[in-house]
Amino acid sequence: MTTQSAANAVNISKLETRLFINNEFVNSVSGKTFEVVNPANEEVICSVQEAGLEDVDKAVAAAKAAFAVGSPWRSLNGSDRRDLMLKLADLVERDRAFLEVLEAMDNGKPIGTDGRYGTSVDLHLVIQYLRYAAGHADKVLGRQIPVDGHIFAYTRKEPVGVCGAIIPWNFPLLMFAWKVGPILATGCTVVFKTSEKTPLTALHIGKLIKEAGFPPGVVNILSGYGSAGEALARHMDVDKIAFTGSTAVGHKIEQYATESNLKKVTLELGGKSPMIIFDDANLETAVNTARAGLFLNQGQVCTASSRIFVHESIHDKFVAAMVQNAQGINVGPYDEKDIDQGPQVDKIQFLKVLGYIEKGIEEGATLRLGGHRHGNKGFFIEPTIFTDVTDDMVIAKEEIFGPVMSIFKFKTDEEAINRANATKYGLAASVVSENGARAISTAHQLRAGTVWINTHNSFDAAVPFGGYKESGHGRELGFEAMENYLETKTVMMPLTGPKV
């Protein structure tokens, strides 16, 4: 689809491109803009206002005012917050078709039809999670504590305050929802900094925030580069920062928080997730699980199963079946029929992934499939499979974030588990086996925040998600996500009269 025909679908001339601060769309103080590019055709979609330090200050001031005691937002009951969130979910559902196309244009992923993954799946999960989180808004509970003496003691859960949320480009709307859900449910306020690669759908959500009736300043949305994210993480009036992105930047976010006001930090970072396929695995299940684990979303998933350990007795059969399956992956732009894989998000990521493929060949891995650019326009890369990969190769250690599968052989269960754990990451892992006891035992030994058995990249609003080691700390989803945005206050008071 050309930019002109895409305009006919989403009316590019009416897209919101300004910053959303205090319930109003405004230009940046500097007047600077940056271009947003459709990765499927390399054409400019539009130019968006670029947030600078002064814009961060304005947005944080709005969020701080909205959180003040006695403000309209702080005066709401939990049930009122719930109802506003449910209204927002309804509005997202109303605009779902529009958002599916806009997200596909902005990010490059397919829309998803006939059971395929795409923006249609993301929108389903966005709506599901907003409604799930809304259900917690009137269920934030403290507890009464029996203590020695004649004293009444209890705890109450209070919102942490003004939050900064820095979200990535691989799941723009879904990561927005994962952050905004618990922030609103717990009564906090927030300033979002979206990725400069994919700012458009979040800005449309700003329209829906206002339409739903949220008071000014509760949600603010800034489009911009890393400098705006750093300013947010360093800001003295921000009480909590939540970041999803690379481990390298995660280290910096921790540093910025420490060097400023010791704000609370939650991090969902990179991964190099192992998948262990045992000799008793069902071959079809193994192949389908590996395909979903690695090639989903063009491989641009922090949980991608980029290290696939296969028992030596079934290795060759698995490789043959996996190659045959991956040959059937349809690569193309989102508006074509039956598309499984879109382009990488931009030229930077496109060249980075091709560089990793070249490195794998250089270090001696065997290229079984793909390894090249797909077509001559857009940032498409062929589904790629390497075998004869060793643990010391660059492609075995570093997060590629592209459609590049690495397959390893192993002999024993102990060997596979030890090699799977031999990484600085610990975001996710998976096990494929027909033996339930073996699979569960392995899952318990793997150092990862999520372990899937006979599946990979399965998520649900109620199930917590987060990493071990350098894959971050804190949890998204489930009730655990609410805890990231709550403080525990203890209240004690001596009583009079007889103790009963």
Image (spheres, helix red, strand yellow):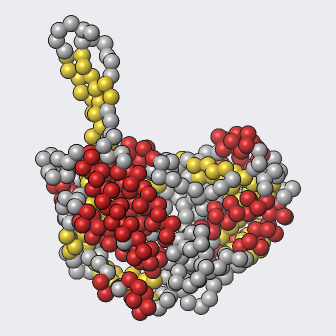
Q: 124 or 350: which is nearer to us? A: 124
Q: Is any atom of residue 478 visible in this view?
A: yes
Q: Is residue 40 left or right of residue 139?
A: right
Q: Is any atom of residue 298 visible in this view?
A: no
Q: Is residue 442 above or below residue 19?
A: above
Q: Residue at 79% x, 59% y: name it.
A: 283
Counting from the top left corner in percent of width and height, residue 6 is at 43, 87
Image quarter where the C terminus lies is top left
Counting from the top left corner in percent of width and height, residue 433 is at 75, 50
Q: Is residue 241 above or below residue 339?
A: above
Q: 411 or 200: which is nearer to us? A: 200
Q: Is residue 243 left or right of residue 223?
A: right
Considering every residue shown, the one lying at the far left of the view is 70
Counting from the top left corner in percent of width and height, residue 200 is at 36, 75
Q: Quadrant of residue 331?
A: bottom right
Counting from the top left corner in percent of width and height, residue 335 is at 52, 83
What is the tally of numbered marks visible in this picture? 0
Considering every residue shown, the one lying at the far top of the view is 498
Q: 255 or 195: which is nearer to us? A: 195
Q: Is residue 2 above or below residue 133?
A: below
Q: Residue at 84% x, 64% y: name it.
A: 317
Q: Is residue 476 left or right of residue 91?
A: right
Q: Residue at 22% x, 53% y: name it.
A: 237
Considering every residue shown, the one lying at the far right of the view is 313
Q: Quadrant of residue 207?
A: bottom left
Q: Residue at 47% x, 52% y: name it.
A: 461
Q: Quadrant of residue 33?
A: bottom left
